[in-house]
Image (cartoon, grey):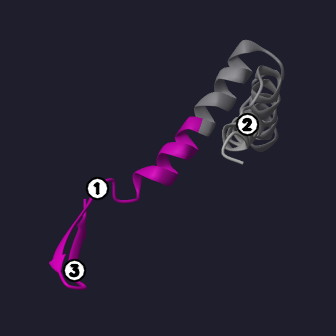
Amino acid sequence: MSKLIPFFLIALLAGCATTPAEREARAQREVDQMVQAYGPACDKLGYKRGTDPWRDCVVKLSTKDSYERYASQPSMTTCFGHHGFFQCTGF
């Protein structure tokens, strides 16, 4: 039985690994979602679809949205206390 444990661990870890094709497919899905979400706005701003400035517009709008979403949350939390009584602050 103990000889089978390493085999099962290797099989389990191999199942968790992603292949380059899977990573590429995930990246393509993310790009497609960005184009779907921000492409119409760039079209309305006057960029011609499929050009480099249009792609740059899509990336910039996505970056701006991500920054606004995550910048409003505390970036650091400090907690101190004793026996279930904690004081936490966020910066």
Give the residue type that dot 2 points to.
Phe
Marks 1/2: CA–CA distance = 42 Å
Amino acid type at circle 3 is Phe
**x, y percentage for residue 87?**
20, 78
Give the position of the C terminus as an image quadrant.
bottom left
Quickly name the residue at label 3.
Answer: 86
Question: Which label's residue is closer to the chain start, 3 or 2?
Answer: 2
Residue 23, by quadrant, is: top right
Amino acid type indicated by mark 1:
Met
Write down the residue under mark 1: 76
Residue 12: give x, y in percent of width and height. 73, 42
Q: Quadrant of residue 24?
A: top right
Q: Magenta residues, as a range?
A: 63-91
Q: Position of residue 67 (x, y in %)?
A: 48, 44
Question: SS class of the residue under badge 3?
Answer: strand
**Closer mark to the observer between disc 3 and disc 2:** 2
Q: Residues within 10 Å of mark 3 (few under 14, many from 20)?
A: few
* Residue 69 visible from this viewpoint: yes
Give the distance between the C-alpha atoms of the residues marked 3 and 1, in whole angstroms.
16 Å
In depth, the one of 51 and 66 nearer the eye is: 66
